[in-house]
C-alpha cells in the first residue's frame, strides 16, 4: 500500500511541476536573440575583454610575477 501512495505522490509532484512549466511566459527564439544582441551592444563599453583594462594591475588575467631568489 505504501508503494501505491508513494507512486501517487510522485505523479502529483510531476503534474504540479508540468503545470508550473506550462504557465511560464514564453518568447520566440528570434525575440530572445534580439534582446541578447541589444544587451551586448548597450554594454560593450563596459566589457573589459573587448576594450581592455585601464591598468595592468586591474587585469585579473595578467601573468603573476614570481619571486626568485638567487
Image: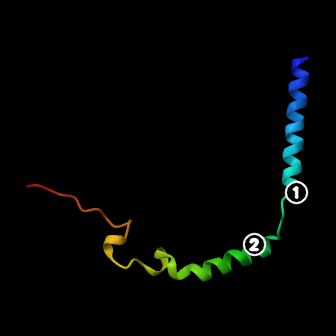
Picture quarter containing residue 58?
bottom left
Q: Quadrant of the N terminus?
A: top right
Do the CB atoms of the residues marked 1 and 2 lie less than 8 Å apart? no
Residue depicted at x 22% and y 58%: 66
Picture quarter containing residue 56?
bottom left
Number of numbered discs visible in the structure rendering: 2
The front one of 30 and 55 is: 55
Between marks 1 and 2 in the image, the one whose residue lies nearer the viewer: 1
The x and y percentages for residue 64 are: 29, 62
Q: Quadrant of the C terminus?
A: bottom left
Farthest top residue? 1
Alpha carbon of mark 1 to alpha carbon of mark 2: how far? 18 Å
Please report whichever mark, 1 or 2, sits nearer to the chain's N-terminal start.
1
- Classify mark 2: helix, strand or loop: helix
Q: Which mark is residue 49?
A: none
Q: Which residue is mark 1?
A: 23
The x and y percentages for residue 26 are: 83, 65
Residue depicted at x 11% and y 55%: 69
In the rendered view, tell whether residue 24 sits above or below residue 9.
below
Mark 2 crowd level (few <14, some 14–19, many ≥20, 10 Å Cα): few
- Classify mark 1: helix, strand or loop: loop
Residue depicted at x 83% and y 71%: 28
In the rendered view, tell whether residue 61 sits above or below residue 53.
above
Q: Which residue is mark 2?
A: 32
Position of residue 49 in the picture relative to residue 20 (left or right): left
Position of residue 39 in the picture relative to residue 55 (left or right): right
The x and y percentages for residue 11 are: 89, 35
Amino acid at each position: 500500500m505504501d508503494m501505491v501512495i508513494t507512486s501517487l505522490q510522485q505523479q502529483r509532484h510531476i503534474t504540479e511541476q508540468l503545470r508550473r512549466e506550462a504557465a511560464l511566459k514564453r518568447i520566440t527564439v528570434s525575440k530572445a536573440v534580439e534582446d541578447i544582441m541589444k544587451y551586448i551592444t548597450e554594454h560593450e563599453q563596459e566589457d573589459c575583454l573587448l576594450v581592455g583594462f585601464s591598468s595592468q594591475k586591474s587585469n585579473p588575467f595578467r601573468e603573476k610575477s614570481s619571486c626568485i631568489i638567487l
